[in-house]
Image: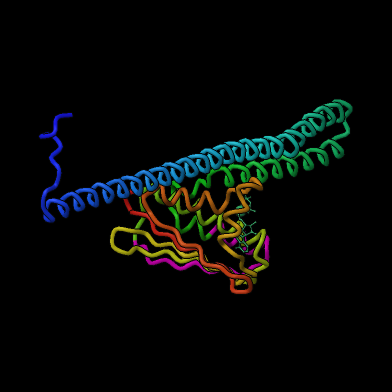
C-alpha cells in the first residue's frame, strides 16, 4: 500500500479524528450486532408463533373430526335405532292387522307415533346443535335467548341476557358471536361451578362488544393458556384466535375465587 494512501497523523487533531472514526466504526459494529440479535430474536419469536398456530390448526381440525364423530354416533345410536325399531313395529302391525287383531294393532300404532316423535326431537336437537335455524331467520338475540334458557334448564345456573345492539348484524358477525358465547358457556358449565352467568351485547361505534361473566371458581389465565394446547384443549385459544382473525380484540379476566369475565369486541363489518 502506498504511503500517501495511509497518511500518518502528524498533529493531535489528526489523532483525534482517527479515534473518532474508530469509535464510529465500533459504534456501528455494535449497532449491527444489536440489529442482528434483534432480528434473530424476532425470527425465533415468529417461528414459535408459527409452530403454535400450526399446533392450534391441527387441534381445530381434530376437534372438528371429534365433533363429526360425536354427531354421527348420536344419529346412529338414537335416530337410526328408533327408525329400525319402527320398521319392526310396522311389520308387527301388518301381521296383527291381517289376523284381525285391530285393538292390539292400534296400540302398537300409537307406540309407533311416540317413537317417531322422539326421533323428530332428537333430530331437532342435533340440527340445532349443528346450526340453530333461528340464527338465520330470527337472528342472534332470540337464538342466544333460546340457548341460554336451555343452558339454565340443563345446568341449573341462572342466566341473564342484555342487549344494546338495536338491530341485526351481518350473518358472519351473528354466527361468530353465537359460537364464541357458546364456547365460553361450555367452559362455564364444564369448569366454573358457577351459580350465575350473564351475557351482555352492545354496539359501540362500529364495533360490537360482548361480555360473558360467570361467578364461578375462576382460574389463572396465563397458566391455562400455556397448558391447554399441550393437553389438546383449544376452547380459549380458539376464542382468542377467532376474534383476532375477525379484526377484534379479546380480554380474559379471571382469578381463582373471582369468577371469569370474557370480553371481546369485533368490527360490525368483520
Ligand atoms: N369459566 C371458567 N371457569 C373456570 N375455569 C375455566 C373457565 N374457562 C376456562 N377455564 C380453565 O381454563 C382451561 C382451558 O379452557 P379451554 O376452553 O381452553 O379448554 P377445555 O375447556 O379444558 O377443553 P376444550 O375447550 O378444548 O373442550 C380449562 O381446562 C379450565 O381449567
Ligand atoms: Mg373449553
Is 138 on the left-hand or right-hand side of 63?
left
In x, y percent, where is residue 182?
55, 54
In-front residue for pair 177/120: 177
In x, y percent, where is residue 29?
30, 46
Position of the N terminus by quadrant: top left
The furthest residue to the bottom: 258
In-front residue for pair 191/220: 220
Is 15 on the left-hand or right-hand side of 101?
left
In x, y percent, where is residue 249?
40, 57
Residue at 53% from the left image edge and 51% from the top image edge: 237
In x, y percent, where is residue 123?
64, 41
In-front residue for pair 33/105: 33
Q: Up-down: is 202 above or below 245?
A: below
Is 120 one of the magenta-colored residues? no
Residue at 61% from the left image edge and 65% from the top image edge: 219
In-front residue for pair 187/26: 26
Q: Which colour scheme is used?
A: rainbow
Residue at 87% from the left image edge and 30% from the top image edge: 96
Q: Up-down: is 252 above or below 215?
A: above
Residue at 75% from the left image edge and 37% from the top image edge: 77
- In this rendering, the count of numbered labels is 0
Q: In which quarter of the image is residue 185?
A: bottom right
Q: Up-down: is 229 above or below 87?
A: below
Is 170 on the left-hand or right-hand side of 217?
left
Instruction: Tell me where the magenta segment starts and ends, as one range.
Output: 146-166
Amino acid at each position: 500500500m502506498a504511503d500517501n494512501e495511509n497518511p500518518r497523523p502528524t498533529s493531535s487533531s489528526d489523532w483525534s479524528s482517527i479515534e473518532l472514526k474508530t469509535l464510529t466504526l465500533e459504534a456501528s459494529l455494535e449497532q449491527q450486532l444489536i440489529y442482528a440479535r434483534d432480528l434473530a430474536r424476532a425470527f425465533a419469536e415468529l417461528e414459535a408463533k408459527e409452530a403454535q398456530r400450526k399446533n392450534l390448526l391441527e387441534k381445530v381440525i381434530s376437534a372438528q373430526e371429534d365433533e363429526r364423530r360425536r354427531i354421527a354416533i348420536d344419529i346412529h345410536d338414537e335416530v337410526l335405532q328408533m327408525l329400525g325399531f319402527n320398521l319392526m313395529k310396522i311389520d308387527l302391525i301388518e301381521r296383527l292387522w291381517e289376523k284381525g287383531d285391530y285393538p292390539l294393532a292400534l296400540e302398537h300404532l300409537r307406540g309407533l307415533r311416540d317413537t317417531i316423535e322422539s326421533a323428530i326431537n332428537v333430530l331437532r336437537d342435533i340440527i340445532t346443535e349443528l346450526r340453530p335455524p333461528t340464527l338465520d331467520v330470527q337472528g342472534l338475540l332470540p337464538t342466544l335467548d333460546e340457548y341460554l334458557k336451555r343452558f339454565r334448564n340443563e345446568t341449573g345456573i341462572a342466566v341473564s341476557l342484555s342487549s344494546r345492539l338495536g338491530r341485526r348484524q351481518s350473518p358472519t358477525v351473528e354466527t361468530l358471536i353465537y359460537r364464541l358465547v357458546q364456547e365460553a358457556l361450555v367452559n362455564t358449565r364444564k369448569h366454573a361451578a358457577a351459580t350465575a352467568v350473564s351475557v351482555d351485547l352492545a354496539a359501540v361505534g362500529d364495533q360490537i362488544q360482548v361480555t360473558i361473566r360467570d361467578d364461578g371458581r375462576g382460574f389463572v389465565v396465563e397458566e391455562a393458556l400455556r397448558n391447554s394446547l399441550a393437553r389438546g384443549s383449544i376452547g380459549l385459544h380458539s376464542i382468542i384466535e377467532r376474534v383476532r382473525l375477525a379484526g377484534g380484540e379479546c380480554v380474559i379476566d379471571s382469578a381463582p375465587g373471582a369468577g371469569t369475565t370474557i370480553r371481546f369486541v369485533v368490527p360490525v363489518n368483520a
